[in-house]
Image: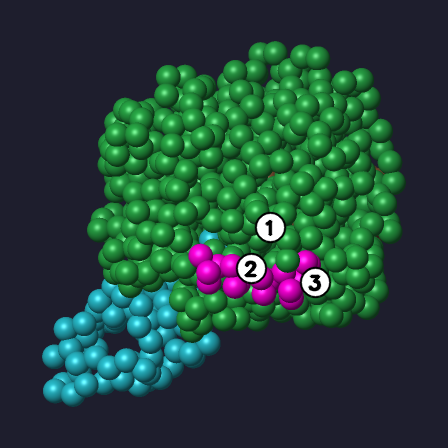
Amino acid sequence: MKALSFNAEKCVGCKLCHLACSAQNEEVFNPRLARLIISSYYDREGLIVEGQVCDLCLECVEACPVDAIVVKNGRLSFLEDLCTDCGLCADICPNQVIIKKDKGIGICVQCRSCSNWCPTGALTFEEVEKL
Amino acid sequence: MTYTGNVLRVNLGTGKAVKEPLNKEWARDYLGGKGLSIKYLYEELKPGIDPLSPENKLILMTGPTTGTIVPNSGKLAIAAKSPATGTILDCSIGGHFAPELKFAGYDAVIIEGKAKNPVYLFIEDDLVELRSARELWGKGAHETEHIIAETLGDVVTMAIGPAGENLLPMACISSELYRQAGRGGIGAVMGSKNLKAIAVWGSGGIEMPDIRKFSAAMNKIKREDTMTDDNMWAYSDGTPMIVDLCQSTGILPTRNFQDGTFAEHEKINSDAVKNTLKAKKACFSCPLACSNYVRKGQSEVEGPEYETLALCGSNCGISDLEAIIEFNRLCDDFCLDTISVGNIVGFAMELTEKGVHDFGIRFGDVENFLKMPGLIAGRKGVGADLAEGVRAIAEKYGGQEYAMQVKGLEIPGYDPRGSWSMGLAYGTADRGACHMRAWPAAVEAFGDIDPFTSEGKAELVIGMQDDNSVKFSAIFCDFWALSTERMAEILSLLLEREIDAAELTKIGERIYNLARLFNEREGFARKDDNLPERVFNEVLSTGFTAGKLLPKKDYEIMLGEYYRLRGWDENGIISEQKKKELNL
Amino acid sequence: MEITLILRGPLKKYADDRSIIAIPTGDRRIQLSAIVDQLGIPASSISFIQINGRKSDLEAFVEGGEEVVVNPRVAGG
């Protein structure tokens, strides 16, 4: 299985990944609805570049009480009709990249929109060890 | 259509903020950004107002590309009447403010009046607040941003420093520390309103039909049209590349434009900057990432851009890159336009060396050079005189022939004697000497066109001015050299109507003429479309431009042809016929 | 004899990412256009050429010992 991997050294902070993700998965240009959080900003110490991405830890799969999040063909899949809006997946995600919506949730489905857009190759898909 | 349809109008005097509908008719004719902000100012400002009075308005204007996945759409237009020149003034600032404003639900913010006490504006979607800036007033823009971030969290902020508070004609606005709306005293407009900062947070988004198909199309354009040889200089080097281009074509401002080459250019060129590079940085939606985040010794900055390396480096006889980086950082923090300050310091150096007036600084004097931003921003010591700009300094002490300014705005980093088209561009730019309305050096000094002839220059400059007018109104960043056809293709999708290149060119012409009409109304005419005497009378002495100057008669030929092609009379006044043709 | 060819900015990709290369000239004078063609750099990607720090053009000849810089197009300053 390949999961998203973030290389901070290559990131320029353009947010094209956020736009690509929300366009593909929510049909809107809204960075706050993306299923990753890439930040490039200045604090008092200097430049901070941080990225939180879905690394296929599968904790959401385990946490969901109704199996609305499953692994299918090496990628996560959200079964909207089963979702009870309990929000446990979003709370438990260690990378905080699951978004809660009015109805249901949004997860990274490894669609490659972000990595296809990233101009510097800071976002790639790498093999992860899974049982 | 990718407008929000809302404009936020804030009156700082009454403390009232209203959401009003965007003027759709004007948006159709002027698109957004530069054009639409100038239209609002033309309609809402009375002629003859004092730019530092509460009657001036500060307009932040996005465009239809803002907030979408269109590459290079992250910039914001900020416009007002200019404190430096009295002309119309539109600036362009990068970073992430523009899309955040759009996501908060606004195409534009119009700021009127003056607050009784220092305030900052906080916009969080529908919530609009004026908050006390009493604790922030007097602080640099950087400290201000850090405090606001600590107070409000994940907001995007723009702020002024002491230069804006002290109403300097070269005060700028900073955002994300190192992005500026630079020229013409735009920061002084904010300062005159007692407005210290603006912070924005937006939770919304932009929808459009077939958004997935549109995104795929934009990705293809990004790969085939944006990230190409033509534009990737921005990623590989950024603007410091231009130091060597100017050195080899003899147009690098050196010691207050006394020469066109600088012996120590290798200490301030792109290779020198790369040795200090920590990271590349991009504005919102930009794949080119032109910004260089650098550190040398104790100093760090996002920069220095070419203009700073030229005007604050070679133009001051300074080759110490660490000093230039620190000078840049100070200017960004105090919010000083480095183009203007570089000119001012260079002018002060020449006046001192010539014995005209002792400002206590000579070319190459690093120690006093580094004191200048503080003295100027604070109007302290020699800063009291220097803070008024080179035109005013010359009026007081002399040296008018080499006070390098047009209409009161100091000249950018290209010597017109080695690029006659740049001379015409400076003389006919709407906000004073500016290289952003038209940059014909790109194809002339740096290309195949003969720089030392008046022939064809008027047509060249007009084409670029009109094209850039559209570009900065739709909003595409300068550094993506996209064709008018490409702009039309993208705008057709965003605006959901068929637009072709011819219509866009007409819109560009309309915008540029409206800016001219604003200036005409303020009393500007041919006499103001002039260049400093140094350009007409003094030859350059080294390198590619040894022995060159721009003869005044050739400048007048270019200017006359420019007016003729524009449909303006010999005095530079727009004809009635042209006004009718453009619906002005 | 050889010349030093410097490819600025993105143009180094035409020399396997090397921005400075030595080009042998043998005993002859070589026209710059020939050198540029051989590297596969499209003329449209070039703004102008410098020889020993001064603007020149592709028609110029070099014979060895010169430093030649090939500059990319630049949109804005």
Q: CB atoms at circles 1 and 2 under 8 Å apart?
A: yes
Q: Sort mark 3 into few (<14), some (14-19) or many (20+) by Cα contacts within 10 Å.
A: some
- The spot of residue A108 in percent (x, y) is 66, 51
Q: Residue at x 30, y 36 (%)?
A: B350
Host chain of mark 1:
B
Could you confirm whether marks 1 and 2 are on the same chain? yes
Is residue B26 visible to the viewer in this orientation of the structure?
Answer: yes
Is C27 placed above or below A90 here? below
- Decide if residue B142 is on the left or right side of residue A78: left
Which span of residues is magenta-colored? B552-569
Disc sitting over residue B567 in the figure: 3
Q: Quadrant of residue B308?
A: top left
Chain identifier, green in the render: B
Q: Marks 3 and 1: in contact by CB < 8 Å?
A: no
Please tell me whether mark 3 sits on a helix, a strand or a loop: loop
Tell which chain the image draws in cyan.
C
Q: Is residue C10 above or below residue A10?
A: below
The answer to which image quadrant residue B50 occupies is top right
Label 2 sits on residue = B559
- The three-letter amino acid code for the residue at tag 1 is Arg
Q: Earlier in the sequence, mark 1 or mark 2?
A: 1
Tell me the residue at 42%/55% (across/down): B416
Residue type highlighted by circle 2: Leu
User: Which residue: 38% across, 62% down?
Assistant: C9
Tag in front: 1 or 3: 1
Q: Is residue B516 left or right of residue A51?
A: right
Label whose residue precedes the other's in the sequence (1 or 3): 1
- The N terminus of chain C sits in image quarter: bottom left
